[in-house]
Image (tube, rainbow, N blue to C red):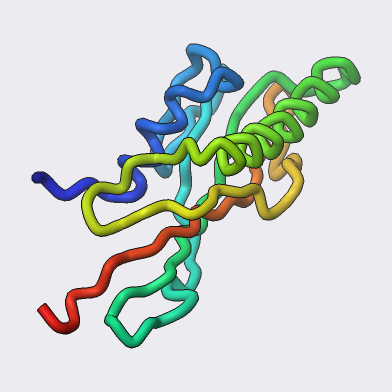
Amino acid sequence: MEYKSIAEALHQYLLSCPLLGDHPLGVDWLPDHSVAFSIDTTPASQIIQRYFSGSTMRQYQFVLRSISDYGSDTLQNLANSALYEQLAAWFEEQTRQRNFPDLGPGRTVQSIEAQSTGYLMTAAPDVGRYQIQCRLIYYEKGTRGR
């Protein structure tokens, strides 16, 4: 079986999120205009816990960013903020239902969660860049004793 990166697994998984609609979903890239989303990796320690067997509990931290319409229209800005509240709730529901990205053999997802509220990162006169910090926790089977 071909190796699948966690970023690739998250990309495939988030394409099924109804909140993103038909908008483009990139990895580590957002356009300058239009409505789009991106999964961006963030630096963090991967290993949360090591087990005697050589297995580990790990985390993959990422930011889900978007670019969308922004400006003096309060209703538009409220809708942008609401989207991120809904995304956090969607992650919680996915964890409750145990509906996770497929990381391939030897890696089993335990949870996916938002670690922050969604917030406006930068703004131009007519577009805003929003983001939410997220984390995927997974178990990786060790190879000790084989």
Compare residues 116 and 140 and report the one nearer the observer: 140
- Relative horizontal placement of residue 106, taking residue 118 as reference (left or right): left
| Percent position of residue 31, x then y | 48, 28
**From what the image shows, is residue 12 above or below residue 51?**
above
Q: Quadrant of the C terminus?
A: bottom left
Q: Which of these two is toward me, 97 or 120?
A: 97
Residue 129 in view (yes/no):
no
Is residue 45 shown to the viewer in this render? yes
**Quadrant containing the N terminus in the rendered view:** top left
Q: How many marks?
A: 0
Residue pushed farthest bottom? 52
Q: Residue at x 40, y 82 (%)?
A: 50
Rendering quarter of residue 46:
bottom left
- Quarter of the image holding residue 84? top right
Compared with 55, 132 (above or below) is above
**Horizontal side of residue 80 vs 114, given as left or right:** right
State the residue in front, 120 or 17.
17
Q: Residue at x 39, y 40 (%)?
A: 101
Horizontal relation, residue 40 to residue 117: left or right:
left
Q: Residue at x 53, y 51 (%)?
A: 111
Find residue 89 and report its image quarter. Answer: top right
Residue lying at the far top in this picture: please name it. Answer: 22
Residue 118 position within the rendered picture, expressed as x and y whole percent measured from the top left: 73, 41
- Residue 9 position in % (x across, y down): 33, 41
Question: Where does residue 65 sit, x and y in percent of width and height?
Answer: 58, 38
